[in-house]
Amino acid sequence: MKQLSLLVLSLTTFALAVSHAQAAEPLELQKVMKELGKNMQVITDGISREDWELVAKTAPMIAEHPQPPMSEKVRIMSFMGAKMSDFKAFDTKTHEAAHDLLHATHEKNGQKVIDAFQKVQSACLSCHQTFRAPFVAHFYGTSGK
């Protein structure tokens, strides 16, 4: 009986340690977001210089950004619960807006490119305002601001 209690205590301690290590370790999604931020800056630079090739080359990197591994997706879906559909809807809007941005660059019409990029920015901002703080608090134990 004493050995069983010791085993249960050891397994519980191990599970808590693994859980804590996962919480402190940056998610792949954080890396994806940082890369998206860099791509957004590249597009801003491209627009300011009317470098439509650069914008056209970078827009698909936003539209078709990498996905986190399945194990991480499961953790995210578990945290999001019923709000996962809202999260996915923001992601879809971002993808669609980035595709629209790509199409606008083919016309080399600066105003259309700016309007399309504004939709990408708005989709990102809406998602961040809705989910960033609770997401960061849950996975990293900080406010995220």
Image (cartoon, helix red, strand yellow):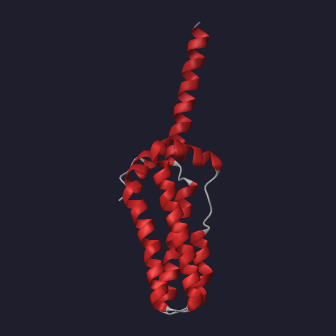
- The answer to whether 134 appears left or right of 99 in the picture is left
Please report the residue visible at 39 percent of the width from the left and 48 percent of the height from the top.
137
Residue 22 sits above or below residue 131 on the image: above
Out of 128 and 28, give the one closest to the viewer.
128
Image quadrant containing the C terminus: bottom left
Residue 129 sits above or below residue 39 on the image: above
Q: Residue furthest top?
A: 1
Q: Position of residue 118 (x, y in %)?
A: 43, 77
Quadrant hosting residue 6: top right
Please report the residue visible at 46 percent of the width from the left and 43 percent of the height from the top.
82
Image quadrant containing the N terminus: top right
- The answer to whether 133 appears left or right of 2 in the picture is left
Q: Position of residue 81 (x, y in %)?
A: 48, 42
Residue 42 sits above or below residue 86 on the image: below
Q: Position of residue 32 (x, y in %)?
A: 56, 63
Please report the residue visible at 40 percent of the width from the left and 66 percent of the height from the top.
125
Q: Position of residue 24 (x, y in %)?
A: 49, 47
- Number of marks present in the image shown: 0
Residue 122 sits above or below residue 108 on the image: above
Quadrant hosting residue 144: bottom left
Out of 84 and 55, give the one closest to the viewer.
84
Please report the residue visible at 54 percent of the width from the left and 20 percent of the height from the top.
9
